[in-house]
Image (spheres, helix red, strand yellow):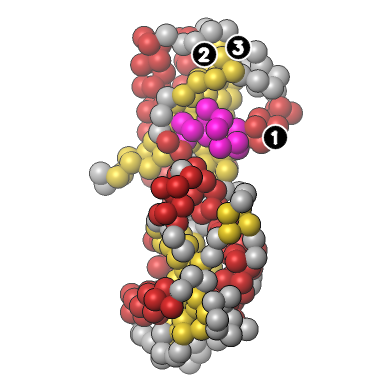
Amino acid sequence: MALDELLEIALRATGSSRAVAFLWEGDRGGLAVAGSRGVDADEIPALEQVVAAADHPVQLAATERLHTSGPAGGEASGTLSAWPIVVGRDGIEEPVGALALVAESDIGPDHAERIGAIADLIGLTVDRSRLLGEAGEQVDWIERVANSDSLTGLANARTLVRVLELEVARAARQGSSVGVAVFDIDDLGSINDRVGRRVGDDILREVAAVLAETVRYVDTVGRLGGDEFALVAPGAASTTVAGRIVERVAGRSIGELSVTVSAGVAAFPADGSTAEDLIAAATAALHAAQAVGPGTLAEATREVEASGHGGNGPRA
């Protein structure tokens, strides 16, 4: 069943004035309107900006996978209710967005259960589109979701490894080099415990933004998982680029928090001949860097250097 049909069913079932399906857009790292009923096209940019707030019911539904509600706000009046949209594959459930309805009053438990089922059907529709390659922009969006980390919008771990495999194969053919850097946000677990996971998520997004802003056009950056990121850098510039990232993160405050990252760098062919070997070597270098202190960079086969902790700073 098509997304538009499901939104129409949700409207009729609840008597709502608006129904909107938001899906994660990997390029932008935020929620984008994938389909709507009762919303003018010229309202959509403002609507996407409003739901980007961390405490907005749509954002909470999409990130926390909870049924949430609150005042509609904006051009609409009444109550906005939101349900998570989830895609399941190989026993793993991936939140891909949220379904939002605007009605005059709260949607009752009976209707809420029915709309939750419709949100699940939207998830199945998204998944089916991914598998079958349905036409147009939806296919492009689904491919981005498959290759992107939903929180940060960067490449996900699977995509990073595949890019690294291709770059290693290219470097082996051409007799050139490729570097890998693994970054870890220093003490993010303590920050989460102290000020909450939402702030931790903001930090992850901010660090992701620094990576995206700092790397070269030929580089690939992504999230390995948790608070770890990685850089794949063709050529011999990985240490230089990684050092700039370490410096720029340290120079950017997030709210009242000062955040740093530590980094480990490895290079093909000196530190490994496969993607797996290079990531392991970079991770080992990262652990050596962390042993020195926060905001530190280390190379797999060379000495550790520190940024702002008594060392000479990352090698530029």
Say few, some or many: other residues with alpha carbon within 10 Å of mark 3 (under 14 / 14 to 19 / 20 or more).
some
Q: Secondary structure at mark 1?
A: helix
Mark closest to the chain's N terminus, 2 or 3: 2
- Marks 1/3 in contact by CB < 8 Å: the verdict is no
Q: In the drawing, does residue 254 fall left or right of residue 134? A: right
Residue 157 is situated, as x and y percent measured from the top left of the image, at 41, 61
- Specify which label sits upstream in the sequence, 1 or 3: 1
Look at 38% across and 11% down and name the residue there. 109
User: Where residue 9 sits: x, y (%)?
Assistant: 47, 15
Residue 316 is marked as: none
Q: Residue at x 46, y 11 (%)?
A: 107
Which residue does the numbered mark 1 point to in the structure image? 45
Residue 70 in view in this figure = yes
The residue positioned farthest toward the left in the image shown? 91
Q: Quadrant of residue 108?
A: top left
* Labels in figure, total: 3
Relative to 197, residue 1 above or below: above
Q: Secondary structure at mark 3?
A: loop
Q: CA distance from mark 1 to mark 3?
A: 20 Å
Q: Position of residue 278 (x, y in %)?
A: 38, 79
Which residue is labeled 2 in the image? 11
Residue 232 visible in the current orientation: no
- Residue name at image x 49 percent, y 87 percent: 177
Residue at disc 2, secondary structure: helix
> Is 58 in the magenta?
yes
Residue that badge 3 annotates:
78
Residue range in magenta is: 51-62
As displayed, is residue 161 above or below residue 265? above
Identity, as a three-letter code, of the amino acid under mark 1: Pro
Asked if 265 appears above or below 32 in the picture, the reply is below
| Mark 3 residue type | Gly
